[in-house]
Image: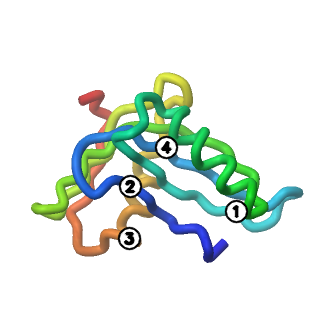
C-alpha cells in the first residue's frame, strides 16, 4: 500500500473531495485515502477515476463519503466541510487526520457547515 499516496488534492481553491477505503480482496490490510479536485463536477466523478487506478494495483475501493475542501496554500490553511449528495458526509475528522500527515505545517479545520 506504500505505493498509494494518502492525499491527492488540488493545490488551491474550493473543490469536492471523497474519503476512500482501500482493501486487499478477501480482507486483510486496509487504509483510507483522500482525493479531491476542481475538475470533478460531482463526487462520483472522483471515485470513477480513483477506482480503476486502485483496482489495477490490486485493491478494492469503497467510498466512505464526501464533502468539500477549501485549500489556501498561501496562508497554509485547509477547511473541510459539507457533504456528498450521492455518498453522504465523510467523517471529516478522519479526513483531517489524513490531511495532517501530508500538510503538517498547515492549520486544518473541519465543520458540518454546508458552505
Give how far apart the Cα atoms at labels 1 and 2 are. Answer: 21 Å
The quadrant in which residue 68 appears is top left
Kindly state the secondary structure of the residue where label 1 is placed: strand
What residue is at 48 percent from the left and 54 percent from the top?
A: 34
Q: Which mark is residue 1?
A: none
Give how far apart the Cα atoms at labels 4 and 3 are. Answer: 16 Å
Look at the image and tell me in which quarter the N terminus lies.
bottom right
**Sequence-first disc among 1 and 4:** 4
The residue identified by callout 2 is 9
The residue identified by callout 3 is 102
Q: Nearer the viewer, mark 1 or mark 2?
A: 2
**Sequence-first disc among 1 and 2:** 2
Left or right: 12 with respect to 37?
A: left
**Sequence-first disc among 4 and 3:** 4
**Sequence-first disc among 1 and 3:** 1
Q: Nearer the viewer, mark 2 or mark 3?
A: 2
Kindly state the secondary structure of the residue where label 4 is placed: strand
**Sequence-first disc among 2 and 3:** 2
What residue is at 38 percent from the left and 57 percent from the top?
A: 96
Tell which of 9 and 21 is nearer to you. 9
What residue is at 51 percent from the left and 41 percent from the top?
A: 46
The residue identified by callout 4 is 18
Left or right: 99 with respect to 4?
A: left
The spot of residue 75 in percent (x, y) is: 11, 61
Q: Residue furthest left?
A: 75
Amino acid at each position: 500500500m506504500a505505493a498509494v499516496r494518502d492525499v491527492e488534492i488540488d493545490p488551491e481553491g474550493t473543490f469536492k473531495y471523497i474519503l476512500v477505503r482501500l482493501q486487499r480482496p478477501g480482507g486483510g490490510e486496509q487504509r483510507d485515502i483522500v482525493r479531491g479536485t476542481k475538475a470533478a463536477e460531482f463526487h462520483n466523478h472522483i471515485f470513477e477515476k480513483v477506482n480503476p487506478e486502485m483496482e489495477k494495483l490490486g485493491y478494492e475501493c469503497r467510498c466512505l463519503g464526501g464533502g468539500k475542501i477549501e485549500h489556501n496554500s498561501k496562508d497554509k490553511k485547509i477547511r473541510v466541510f459539507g457533504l456528498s449528495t450521492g455518498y453522504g458526509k465523510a467523517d471529516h475528522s478522519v479526513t483531517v487526520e489524513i490531511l495532517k500527515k501530508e500538510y503538517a505545517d498547515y492549520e486544518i479545520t473541519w465543520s458540518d457547515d454546508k458552505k
